[in-house]
Amino acid sequence: MHLNTMEILAAFMVLFAIIDILGSIPIILDIKTKTGTIYPAKTTLVAFGIMLLFLFIGEPLLALFGVDISSFAIAGSIILLLMGLEMVLGIQLFKHELGGGGAIVPIAFPLIAGAGSITTLLSLRAEYHIINILVALSLNMIIVYLVLRITTFFERILGPNGLHILRKFFGIILLAIAIKLFLSNTGIEIPK
């Protein structure tokens, strides 16, 4: 075992920025409004499981299906694009089932365990010892769980009007993230 505080801290910060659970609060609240509940423990465990799976066997698993990381990222960007359109236009593209369906798609995947976090895990594996990445990932999952648990608190503070404004604003942000993820994985460059 090679526990290294600096590696854990570095991996934690990178994963925290990529997972961006705090920035996802408006999206999570939007999904909670549509599904009724989000089941924080189930959602966190599914996201954690997906990320562990990809940490240990990600590239061979995708290769088994003939899919590369870029194609996987593009598929995730399309889901994020559709979620952004839902938020901005006030339409429903995804069928959100009551009883926890929203916990898996789109919260656990691709919002938390998305193409960005999976690609990051594979990149971190090339730089750091696996035990340090596991500790950093576990700490991030604790934060994800805590944020998912206190979504009701954010709902009360913001109120219906605040949630509506936040939903529209972050819908546009989500659209921009989806487009950036799509373009960066297709190699298309937009002139500045």
Image (cartoon, rainbow, N blue to C red):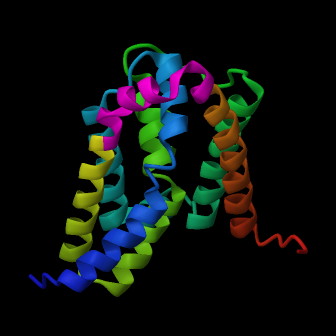
Residue 129 position in % (x across, y down): 24, 82
Q: Position of residue 14 (x, y in %)?
A: 41, 71
Is there any visible trace of residue 187 in the rendered image? Answer: yes
Quadrant assignment, res 150: top left
Question: Image quadrant of residue 145?
Answer: top left
Q: Residue at x 38, y 20 (%)?
A: 37
Q: Position of residue 25 (x, y in %)?
A: 48, 40
Residue name at image x 70 percent, y 34 percent = 168
Residue nearest the viewer, comparing 40 with 46: 40
Up-down relation of residue 143 to residue 36 (above or below)? below
Residue 143: % across, % down:
29, 51
Location of residue 156 with respect to 106 vertically, above or below: above
In this view, the residue in front, 33 or 124, is 33
Left or right, 2 with reference to 8: left
Q: Quick check: 176 above or below 118?
A: above
The span shown in magenta is: 147-163
Tell me if 39 is positioned left or right of 23 in this view.
left
